[in-house]
Image: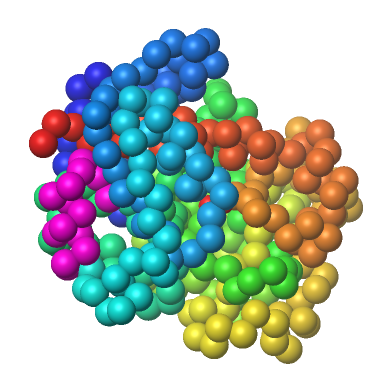
Amino acid sequence: MEPLFKGKHFITLEEWTKPEIDKLLEVSKQLKSDFLNNVPTPYLTNKTAFLMFFEQSTRTRNSMEAGLAHLGGHGVFLDTSNMQISHGESAKDTATILSSYGHGIACRNCFWGIGNKYLREMAANSSVPIMNLQDDLYHPMQGLADLMTIQEVFPDKKHVKVSIIWAYATSHKKPISVPLTQILLFPRYAMDVTLAYPLGYDLPDWAVEKAKKNAAENGGSFRITHDMEEAYRGADIVIPKNWGSWVNNQSTAVVDDLLQSYKGWKCTEEMIALANPDVKYMHALPADRGNEVVDSVIDGVHSIVYQEAENRLHTAKAVMAMTMGNK
Ligand code: CP
């Protein structure tokens, strides 16, 4: 396989054209088929990627590590609390040195106001592609897997109605990067996107303006509502998921009075019944079961969360195979 996008950073899908994203999806589908049929895919033989995590992960870490092994390469997991970063070593020095040891650097840094800047600083100083494993603004690996999953379940539908709906959770103060990535990406694929959230949980104004622009340029639509039930009504896909009030409140406290006033923002069977009869329930996971969603929905017939999570493997492999070529 030609590393068509050799050296290209993967920090936000906004910096990838639609034909480039389509190519990533085409390769993801081929890699999925090859994996399921035990066809060898040695596209990164003897290649190394460094996987830096400032935060916990299940899907992202393991899809990258397993994916590198499937491609014939090697992933080095780095808990940043055990790196000299914890003594203050700079992003510049870290990226310069790791890029001289291997062929790609991937990083998760979700600290509000810091994460994306950190990745940009690494990209400015790296001779190999920087891959964003989630920062404070973007989660492109998740967005790509979500898009692949939507195309699998609605292959022929022209204007898929997708509702991205804030949900109550107490597990941690989650980044805004998943819904922000989705509102930017889905309108580029002519989807009719509704963003629903209670007052106080805004996404940044610049992202909302860009989502509207992406919709206008690509035949999609984008609207905001603060009425949860309205967002469920008639939807083909619902994505009820918590995110933190970072835009309005930078405190790292997980639970506050504002959050507690929105316990009713939960995905229940009653909410699902408002949507189209064949509605699909998606969630990037981990889900805060019992708070964001009831078990009977996430474990029910409408749920495609495991297909969505599986596609993280195939899309991660496509990104790595296409960006990490010979040095
Ligand atoms: N969806 C997602 O990024 O999962 P992890 O936090 O487990 O990597």
Give coordinates of residue 115: x percent, y percent.
Answer: 36, 69
Q: Quadrant of residue 103?
A: top left
**Which percent across, then down, holds residue 305?**
67, 41
Side of 307 relative to 219 (left or right): right
Q: Is residue 212 above or below residue 237?
A: below
Report the side of 152 relative to 241 (left or right).
left
**Is 80 placed left or right of 154 in the picture?**
left
Name the spot of residue 23 as percent of width and height, x first.
32, 28
Q: Is residue 159 visible?
A: no
> Which residue lies at the image location 57% right of the left edge and 49% below the top edge?
58
Magenta span has 97? Answer: yes
Which image quarter: residue 184? bottom left
Q: Quadrant of residue 46?
A: top left
Q: Residue at x 53, y 30 (%)?
A: 151
The N terminus: image quadrant = top left
Q: Nearer the viewer, residue 240 or 315?
A: 315
Quadrant, the C terminus: top left
State whether residue 101 is above or below residue 72.
below
The residue nearer to you, when weighing 154 against 67, is: 67
Q: Which residues are magenta?
A: 92-105
Residue 41, x across and y down, in percent = 36, 18
